[in-house]
Amino acid sequence: MNAAGANSFSAGQQLRLARGFSSAFWSLPLMAALHAAALARLGPAAWVVTGLPGSFLPLGWGLWLMMSVAPDDARWRSRVRCVGWLTLITAWLSPFLPWWLGVPQLDYLAVNAGLHYLLLIACLMSLNGLAAAYAARTGDTALRREAFAGLWMVLWLSLCTVGVLLWLFHRAGLLGAGLPAILRELAELPREAQSLFLLPYAMTAYVLWRAKETGFRLAAE
């Protein structure tokens, strides 16, 4: 570890950052569970519609803690603020997922549900990027490598998911059947296929856990 980098945050700041990353980490299982419930149509629809944006609250709290650490560091605050805006917009669009699953033939709902997925991937990638920036500030090269690996894995997994679905729809002859047929089939994916949408959470959660542990360790030194 680079000692100079490790001193860029005080012990108190490291503790606050660790709590921020911890809050962000615990938000991910909640978000994944609510997304899984929406995809599988588990529980009352009203609960899922309310719970999806609510699952982003711990993440928002964690980002606020991280941004308040260095009030004079414009670059760090700007980076955290960008992640915060992505989180806010993604949370705002999240109810469109269960709404679209209820009426999959409506283009308006389908477009917003798709936009939600794209922004969710961008949000998860930005969280990995934030962990990489934190690692660079603390001189933790191992965490920085893992965070960048997590960022690219999230992108790769999302592209693979889209690619697999396109291949399956092509094999089933759905690509030429028109958009309504594709949307209906997409809304009725089996559980195995639905799980592909949840894989990016796992890699991001690991990176945030590592960042949290790094923060607590540095705060104790």
Image (cartoon, rainbow, N blue to C red):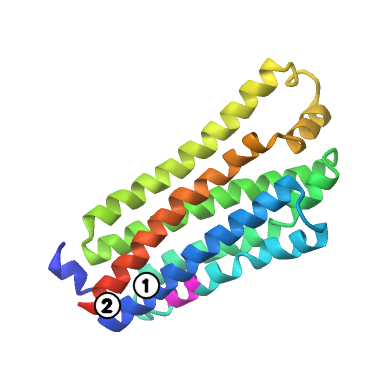
- On the question of residue 82 being in view, the answer is no
Tell which of 146 and 118 is nearer to you: 146
Q: Is residue 85 above or below residue 74?
A: above
Q: Amino acid at mark 2?
A: Ala
Q: Is residue 30 above or below residue 158?
A: below
Q: Are marks 2 and 1 in contact (CB under 8 Å)?
A: yes
- On the question of residue 141 being in view, the answer is yes
- What's the CA distance linking mark 2 and mark 1? 8 Å
Q: Which mark is residue 219?
A: 2
Q: Determine whether the residue tagged by mark 1 lies in a helix, strand or loop.
A: helix
Within 10 Å of disc 2 (Cα), the crowding (few <14, some 14-19, many 20+) is some
Tell which of 133 and 56 is nearer to you: 56
**Magenta segment, which residues?**
62-67
Quadrant of the image for the N terminus?
A: bottom left
Residue sitting at x 81%, y 33%: 184
Q: Amino acid at mark 1?
A: Ala
- Residue 85 in the image: x percent, y percent? 56, 64
- Seen in the image, is 170 located left or right of residue 143? right
Residue sitting at x 15%, y 69%: 4
